[in-house]
Image (tube, helix red, strand yellow):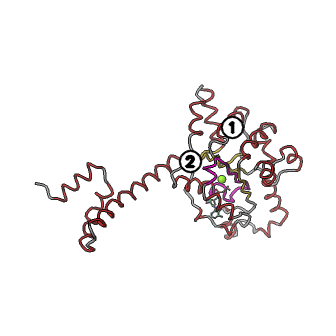
Amino acid sequence: MNTPIERLQTALETLGLKAVETRLENLLEQASKKEPSYAEFLDELLNCEVEARRTRYLRARLQLAHLPFVKTFEQFDFSFQPSIDERQIRELRSLRFIHEASNVIFLGPPGVGKTHLSVALAEAAIRSGLGAYFITAHDLATDLGRAYREGRLDRRMRIYLAPKVLLIDEVGYLPLDDLGTTIFFQLISARYERGSIILTSNKSYGDWGSIFGDSIIATAILDRLLHHSTTVNIRGESYRLKDRRKAGLVPTREQEGAAAHLSLASDSVSPKPRQKAALGSTPSEAKEVHS
Ligand code: ADP
Ligand code: MG
């Protein structure tokens, strides 16, 4: 005849209550010391399993999201980027924009935390049970371009339409060809007012014509993307350079000279006047025009 503990272990295994099974001896030992009520003991026992499942579920959802790394808001040093409006970030963290199927666009030069903040929003979304999916603009165009050539674009598109939040990273580092541009437009249109997009770009809206090779289609993309949207414009310096600067491997901002620094910042965040007129969509104008 088995002992009660052995029978318990078999039952826990049959029921798939792995967390309780692993911690059984420990839980029993603690209970014999603390002498909790029956209800308290059952509560602790079942909570142990609930917590373990929640963690497993979260990990699986994070994996499904294909995030390049998992970073949170707690890990972001806002004092390093004073151009970020923390109130705006607080509002985004409420995740209301996801429920409203509105978009978030992070603009700024390399290394200022665009991907970090996007991923942090995705992590928060996943934690609250909302699905997210991460892909770079280049991989997106390659993947959907291949699907189109193989005659299965509609089916493949569903991967990018299904999640509540789609993260499209690095729009603008590489220009898209005609097919990539057409597919990108289709995707933005299909998600319009149905699901959120979080997008990062090193190019100001005025320069988007050069990404898509055509300012008319860039305007059409921006029109849908910005209709319900928040733009977070980061005008700081690269966090990646911070430690190297400290170690003296990179000249300090002062050494670089203010002019060089200004051109780095303005190159990617302020549209050129001509293009501004064509697209009418600097971040602040976009808000005024579209919201
Ligand atoms: P971007 O996407 O704008 O090029 P990333 O988000 O990839 O930049 O940031 C580069 C690296 O620096 C990442 O490891 C990120 O976690 C880190 N980082 C950037 N900004 C900050 C910050 N303000 N506080 C903490 N870490 C940061
Ligand atoms: Mg990035």
Q: Amino acid at mark 1?
A: Ser
Q: Quadrant of residue 231?
A: bottom right
Observer able to see residue 69? no
Answer left or right for 229 relative to 146.
right
Above or below 33: residue 63: above
Residue marked by disc 2: 132
- Which badge, 2 or 1, comes first in the chain's sequence? 2
Q: Secondary structure at mark 1?
A: helix
Q: Quadrant of residue 77?
A: bottom right
Residue marked by disc 1: 189
Q: Position of residue 27 (x, y in %)?
A: 28, 65
199 in the magenta segment = no
Magenta span of residues: 96-117
Q: Position of residue 80 (x, y in %)?
A: 69, 68
Q: Position of residue 217 (x, y in %)?
A: 77, 37
Q: Quadrant of residue 261?
A: bottom right
Q: Amino acid at mark 2?
A: Ala
The residue shown at (23%, 52%) is 11
- Within-10-Å neighbours for mark 1: few <14, some 14–19, many 20+: some
110 in the magenta segment = yes
Tell which residue pokes out farthest to the top in this image: 151
